[in-house]
Image: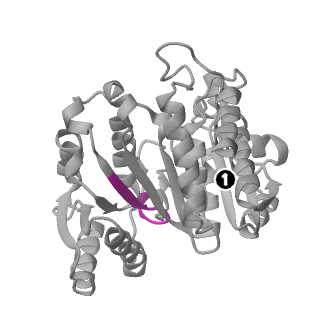
Amino acid sequence: MQFKIATLPGDGIGPEIIEQAVKVVNAIGEKFGHQFDYQHAVVGAAAIDATGDPFPEETYEACKNADAVLFGAIGDPKYDNDPKAKVRPEQGLLAMRKKLGLYANIRPVSTFKSLLHKSPLRTDLVDGADFVVIRELTGGIYFGQPRGRSEDQNTAFDTCVYTKEEVQRIVKLAFEYAGKRNKKLTAVDKANVLATSRLWRETVQEMAGDFADIELEYMFVDNAAMQMIQWPKRFDVIVTENMFGDILTDEASVITGSLGLLPSASVGIQTSVFEPIHGSYPQAAGKNIANPLGTVLSAALMFELGLDLQDEAKAIREAVDASLEEKVVTEDIAEGKAYSTSAVGDWLAEYILKK
């Protein structure tokens, strides 16, 4: 089979980790008889430097016409340290979500036996933790209008907006996802305070009858944040709005012991984007030390969810598991010899081809 893949390395370590994911994808292609046509495009600070636009039209076209998008990371200190910057790399990420209709972010959180001791939580709490957070991406306070500052600049305001249709779309996806797993869904909101959360809860209640086989619970976001640390194994699928999901998924990421291991998928109307959850880590850029496993596992999600090739996804995950067991890892999780970013990528590709 032949596929078009848009690759958006982005900023910082993005180019290095995307390079390793491409190695792994090519190995899968050779093993399973697929061909991949890559369209490389700029986004974020790299795009601002090249075009003045963090998500230029050429990048949008490359993504829109692709079967799937592999994305690295966005962010640059020269913008982070300038709160008055008019154009920012993160605007490219928001524009990509909006223009591609990326309405749902799917973040699996699972632990690896060989790394349980690296979690800040006790081993008995995290061993066997395996849940998915489904976060709405195109609504809420990150996109709501109006927003801005008062004339004297001493007051700032943002607006949180959701429509019923936006909530229905993401909740339907979450119910369906729960049906493929352990048939348990936790709807997280702040319905005791926020009008938008009350709309969320009302909508979930209305839809629940169509998914009678799913065990449904409601949880306020502050309680969910606490229980995620106290008892992470109690969750299976969580669905929530944009800002709550942003915060909770970062909290959940530390359960595994390393940000560098977690993939994500952003499901879109036109195409879907697959990316690691860590940032651009500019301090490591160009040093060949960044952990590529989150990006490689995002490629596995690409095969699973974007291309519907389950055996190919399984082969990648088996290779990553083997690299962890054999301690072929980068310095962030190494306990002895540390391998370079490119060496890990080479090892994974060779493992897939030999297996």
Residue sitting at the far top: 336
Viewer-side residue, 339 vs 46 = 339
Residue sitting at the far front: 355
Q: Tell me the kind of residue under disc 1.
A: Leu
Question: Image check: 270 left or right of 189?
Answer: right
Say if residue 157 shows up in the picture.
no
What residue is disc 1 on? 70
- Color theme of the render: one colour
Viewer-side residue, 53 vs 272 = 272
User: Residue at 55% of width from left, 19% of height from top?
Assistant: 331
Q: Crowding at label 1, few (<14), some or many (≥20) Cα neighbours within 10 Å? A: many
User: Residue at 46% of width from left, 15% of height from top?
Assistant: 335
Q: Position of residue 187 (x, y in %)?
A: 25, 65
Which quadrant of the view contains residue 24?
top right
Where are the magenta residues, as a range? 131-141
**Element assignment for label 1:** strand
320 versus 210 height, above or below: above
